Amino acid sequence: MTKEIAGWHHVYSGKVRDLYESNDPSLSHLILVVASDRVSAFDHVLEPAIPNKGKHLTTLTNWWFDRLPVENHVSHEVPVPQEVQGRATVAKKLEMFPIECVVRGYISGSGWKEYQEKGEICGVELPEGLTFGGKLPKPIFTPAFKAELGDHDENISFEKVVEIIGLDNAERLRALSIEIFNKASELAEHAGLILADTKFEFGIDPATGHTVLGDEVLTPDSSRFWSKAAWDRGERKDSFDKQIVRNWLAANWDQTSEPPVLPQEIVAQTQDKYAELVERLTTEVA
């Protein structure tokens, strides 16, 4: 059930976020993005929610926006409503590109599976002999085409991105994504963290024509962070995100029936991972 918010009306809900438009016609260019505590995995929204998850995602996204060398979608025209303070953002409406701009600095997740099968990821050829969790020679852009709600995003080649949005836009998104990834990696390193991979979403600001960074950025829902100390010890699977949830589901669910309810210990462990990442970044990085 979506929350009633004075002065705003609900227009859409995704897996984990709710969108509202202003009741004031003069603010029709703005959107209120509310991060819920819902958690999704394998394209299903799960029960129960992860307490404080929405606040953690919003805190981290705003922290990164203040430090990244690119225009973002945040608007300060009107304040965030009190009802959703701490878990919401008033943002400019953008003409979003239908591309998930994934950047990988290390090999894991679906990228590892594709590399094992083809020796490449999204058409990017990689050296032989890479191991799970290993560092790539340099960060690579491995985009995906954004699917409709409930469908799987489709990994695509850069050439396919060009077909969808044109060469200039494709090159701009690739360059921006890698630039942001490199800057974020430097900042994460100061907190003893490795940014293994992440995804960005961009759109065009109709008022300026600029390419703008939108959505959430560099959160546990959109990124894979590892402890540098653990990685140096050879540990590759303990990440600061919902991997705990994915691992439990993989061991306890056939992925065809309705997903089971998450045990309280899995919920608590996931909540702790989100909170630890926020604390490490926001207290250890200037």
Image (cartoon, rainbow, N blue to C red):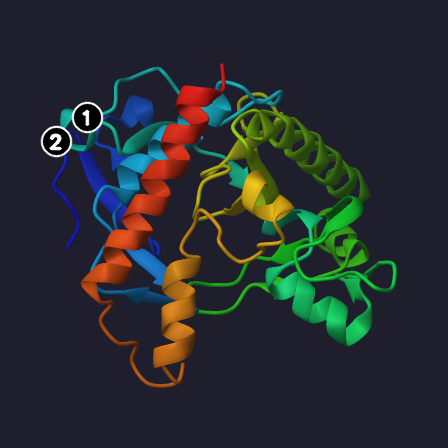
Query: Which residue is at a point 46% across and 39% down the rendered structure image?
Result: 215
Side of 11 relative to 139 (left or right): left
Give the x, y percent position of residue 259: 30, 76
Q: Residue 81 bears which disc, if any?
A: 1
- How packed mark 2 is, by other alpha carbons closer than 10 Å (few <14, some 14-19, many 20 or more), is few
Instruction: Count neighbours of disc 1 (C-alpha within 10 A) and say few if under 14, some if 14 to 19, many if 20 or more.
Output: some
Q: Residue at x 14, y 35 (%)?
A: 5
Q: Amino acid at mark 2?
A: Ala
Residue drawn at point x = 59 percent, y = 50 percent: 100
Q: Which mark is residue 6?
A: 2
Between residue 72 and residue 31, name the one nearer to us: 72
Q: CA distance from mark 1 to mark 2?
A: 8 Å
- Amino acid at circle 1: Pro
The image position of residue 137, as x and y in percent, is 82, 46
Residue 35 visible from this viewpoint: no
Q: Is residue 117 visible?
A: yes
Q: Relative to 89, does residue 120 appear above or below in the rendering?
A: below
Q: Secondary structure at mark 1?
A: loop
- Quick one: 269 or 157, which is closer to the camera? 269
Could you tell me if the residues under marks 1 and 2 are in contact, i.e. CB atoms within 8 Å? yes
How far from the left and from the top, in percent, is residue 203? 57, 37
